[in-house]
Image (cartoon, helix red, strand yellow):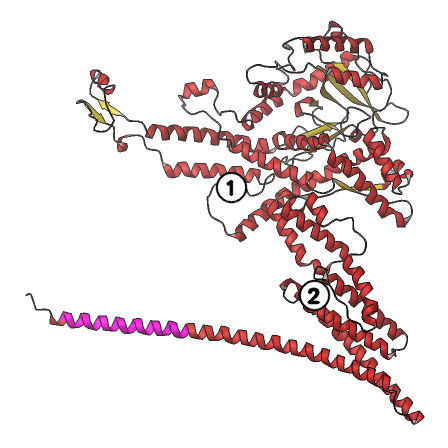
């Protein structure tokens, strides 16, 4: 495609606007409903004699809930995305990826403008199904969100945008926007036209009241509806004057460098108050053959809802939550209005008159205390009035609520289905999981689509001269990242970070608790991550979780460090005192790993350690057993305690074998030399053997105590069951005896009653 004149561009834009006219009408209806507009127009309410004409805001609440959960799922993760590097020295790739991830997300998380981009995209997705953003300037990393009516694409455009050849964006330029954009780069701008527009806008700003309308109400009814809602009475009185333009992009396949996207800007000629030169056939911006992107993802990014059913999925056939809820919410508002009218009707006092003259008597009725009803008037009794079927009305409300719940389940979890049935905890979790499965599939698609946007943002951080981007590169290079990374984004993977529970608070906490249950079996780094997730899920405060459980501590923990330091002291046979605040799982696990390594080393050296080494092993085993015993009060630690017991049992068998070998060697040496065994060695072996026996006896005694306690508990439970059965049997026998006595007494009284016959 090649554009030779602005008029051809305007003709193409006008064709897309005409095709979008019917879609705009439907979008306005959806927008009005979820803005809280009443279900009847003024003419409809008058013709139907409807006394109540308000919105009960059920659809608005569902829409806000869906937006809240969707936004939470995208904004709550600690990072928007993670970067992994696939080039360079292998020992530096992970570090480079972590540094790039942390630094780019630090800037994005602090950006209020980018948070607004996410919120705007989510709002557009829920209301209309399409959430477009574009990069208007090559020097900005943060895209700009647009309303759906401001982005025009041809019919039959696929959601993948693979067949998109041109599109137009309706953009409002303020005076400051024009000055900023043309000051940095005058190449391509028609400065004569720009200066004329700037003068016109400056004159409008000096006026007390702006008479400029924002856009053509025929082609942009959505904007008119939103402006009326915002301004209410004094329409456009304090609006900043703007110049509306069409930012037009087209794919030029005739370039020598291959297909590339070109850009043109023309003034929207439907607006008023601008200089006459703007209506002329001229470009506001024409950079010639300058390329603005090799792929459309470098210019525009679009999020789509998941409501379409007919593949291949097209842009204009997308179905949103607003579309799914419009009919039932509109019907529910009408039903509630009519129901409210019926309620008010039942509260009216109605009289029956015999003639027209008696109508005057109605005005004289005094319905106060001790009031008198004049002769000729009679009450209209409730059974003489029109009665509504309450059951049918209730069923209608419940049916509509259930339809709302089923339509919104994909966008929002735990929507009341209108049955008003009290659910158990299991039913609540089952419904949340079923609803979250739909929400999770939609969010999974949203995360996947968002990765294209994240990749383009990362590319801009690598290449453009924005202050944020230059600071990002400086911080990364200061931490050791090779500048060659800025030229090799295609060799990096960008993965969106996904929220636990898909934005649902209850499921997030449940997942965190499940992970905490298996935390002792994870590596120290993984344990730190799980603990961080648990704190964040329960406090909903990412900053507090980062302070209490910082993820940056990827090195050895304090418990691991303390264990390595305690090893030397324990090896010499001395005691070690451990504070209560230490992570005993990591501490005990590290000592067991070091003990296992020492045993393997001893085996490789022949399995004949020195007697003092055996003493050190015994001292370490006893210390580990003492520290593991401190965890027995926690039920969740029982699997870990069993693992420790098995490890100590295996180590004890090996140490016992070492002691026997040492004794045999000493005895053989003594017999060969005709001498007695060395008293010091003998004392050490006796002491080590005594410790081993004491440790084994203690372990056996604890097992026996646990068995006895279990038997005693079972006996108490059995005795309680037997006692309860005996008491129940005694009560039954007593009741039977009492019943027999009463029956006998009644029979006796019956036999003593005189015969009345």
Is residue 500 placed above or below 667 in the rendered structure?
above
Q: What residue span does the magenta drawing correspond to?
A: 725-750
Asked whether disc 2 touches disc 1, contact meaning CB atoms under 8 Å apart, the reply is no
Q: At 84% across and 48% down in the image, what residue appears?
A: 94
Q: Residues within 10 Å of mark 2 (few under 14, many from 20)?
A: some
Looking at the image, tell me whether mark 2 or mark 1 is earlier in sequence order. Answer: 1
Is residue 54 placed above or below 406 in the rendered structure?
above
**Farthest bottom residue in view:** 674
Residue to which mark 2 is pinned:
640
Image-quadrant location for residue 459: top right
Location of the N terminus (image quadrant): top right
Q: What x and y, as percent, mark residue 421? A: 46, 46
Q: What x and y, as percent, mark residue 681? A: 86, 84
| Side of 355 relative to 312 (left or right) | left
Residue to which mark 1 is pinned:
416
Image-quadrant location for residue 582: bottom right
Q: At 46% across and 43% down in the image, what residue appears?
A: 419
Is residue 494 placed above or below 274 in the rendered structure?
below
Q: Is residue 104 magenta?
A: no
């Amino acid at each position: 495609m090649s554009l030779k004149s602005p008029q051809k561009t305007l003709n193409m834009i006008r064709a897309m606007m005409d095709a979008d006219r019917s879609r705009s009408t439907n979008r306005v209806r959806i927008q009005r409903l979820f803005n809280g507009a009443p279900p009847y127009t003024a003419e409809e309410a008058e013709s139907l004699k409807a006394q109540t004409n308000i919105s009960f805001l059920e659809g608005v609440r569902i829409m806000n809930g869906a937006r809240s959960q969707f936004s939470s799922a995208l904004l709550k993760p600690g990072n928007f995305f993670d970067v992994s590097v696939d080039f360079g020295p292998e020992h530096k790739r992970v570090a480079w990826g972590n540094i790039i991830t942390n630094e780019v997300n630090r800037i994005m998380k602090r950006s209020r403008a980018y948070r607004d981009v996410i919120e705007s995209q989510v709002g557009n997705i829920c209301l209309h199904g399409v959430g477009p953003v574009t990069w208007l300037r090559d020097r900005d990393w943060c895209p700009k969100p647009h309303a759906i009516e401001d982005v025009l694409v041809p019919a039959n455009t696929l959601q993948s945008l693979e067949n998109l050849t041109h599109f137009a964006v309706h953009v409002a330029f303020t005076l400051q926007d024009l000055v900023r954009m043309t000051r940095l780069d005058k190449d391509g701008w028609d400065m004569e036209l720009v200066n004329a527009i700037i003068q016109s806008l400056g004159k409008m700003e000096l006026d007390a009241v702006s008479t400029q309308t924002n856009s053509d109400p025929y082609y942009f009814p959505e904007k008119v509806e939103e402006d009326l809602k915002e301004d209410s009475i004094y329409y456009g009185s304090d609006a900043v004057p703007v110049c509306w333009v069409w930012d037009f992009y087209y794919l030029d396949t005739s370039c020598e460098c291959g297909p590339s996207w070109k850009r043109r800007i023309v003034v929207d000629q439907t607006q008023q108050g601008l200089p006459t030169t703007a209506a002329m056939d001229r470009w506001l911006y024409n950079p010639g053959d300058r390329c603005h992107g090799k792929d459309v993802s470098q210019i525009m990014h679009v999020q789509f809802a998941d409501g379409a059913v007919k593949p291949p999925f097209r842009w204009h056939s997308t179905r949103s939550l607003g579309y799914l809820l419009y009919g039932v919410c509109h019907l529910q508002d009408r039903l509630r209005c009519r129901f409210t009218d019926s309620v008010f009707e039942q509260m009216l006092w109605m009289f029956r008159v015999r003639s027209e003259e008696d109508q005057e008597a109605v005005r004289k009725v005094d319905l106060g205390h001790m009031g008198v009803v004049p002769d000729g008037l009679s009450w209209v009794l409730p059974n003489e009035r029109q009665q509504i079927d309450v059951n049918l009305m209730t069923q209608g409300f419940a049916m509509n609520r259930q339809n709302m719940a089923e339509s919104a389940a994909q966008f929002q979890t735990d929507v009341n289905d209108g049955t008003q049935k009290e659910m158990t905890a299991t039913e609540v979790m089952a419904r949340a999981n079923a609803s979250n499965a739909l929400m999770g599939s939609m969010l999974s698609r949203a995360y996947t689509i968002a990765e294209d946007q994240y990749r383009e943002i990362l590319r801009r951080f690598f290449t453009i001269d924005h202050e944020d981007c230059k600071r990002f590169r400086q911080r990364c290079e200061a931490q050791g990242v090779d500048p060659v990374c800025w030229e090799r984004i295609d060799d990096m993977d960008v993965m969106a970070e996904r929220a636990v529970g898909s934005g649902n608070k209850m499921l997030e906490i449940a997942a965190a608790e499940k992970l905490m249950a298996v935390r002792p079996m994870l590596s120290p780094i993984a344990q730190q991550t799980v603990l961080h997730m648990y704190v964040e899920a329960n406090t909903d405060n990412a900053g507090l979780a980062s302070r209490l459980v910082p993820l940056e501590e990827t090195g050895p923990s304090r418990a691991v460090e303390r264990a390595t330091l305690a090893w030397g002291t324990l090896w010499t046979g001395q005691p070690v005192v451990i504070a209560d605040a230490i992570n005993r799982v990591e501490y005990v696990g590290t000592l067991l790993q070091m003990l296992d390594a020492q045993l393997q080393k001893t085996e490789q050296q022949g399995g004949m350690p020195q007697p003092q080494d055996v003493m050190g092993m015994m001292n370490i085993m006893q210390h580990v057993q003492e520290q593991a015993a401190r965890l027995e009060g926690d039920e969740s630690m029982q699997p870990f305690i069993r693992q420790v017991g098995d490890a100590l049992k295996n180590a004890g068998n090996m140490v016992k074998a070492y002691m026997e070998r040492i004794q045999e060697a000493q005895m053989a040496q003594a017999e060969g030399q005709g001498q007695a065994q060395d008293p010091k060695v003998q004392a050490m072996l006796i002491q080590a053997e005594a410790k081993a026996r004491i440790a084994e006896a203690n372990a056996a005694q604890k097992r026996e105590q646990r068995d006895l306690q279990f038997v005693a508990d079972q006996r108490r439970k059995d005795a309680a069951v037997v006692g309860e059965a005996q008491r129940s049997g005694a009560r039954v026998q007593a009741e039977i005896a009492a019943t027999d006595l009463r029956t006998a007494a009644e029979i006796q009284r019956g036999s003593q009653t005189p015969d009345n016959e």
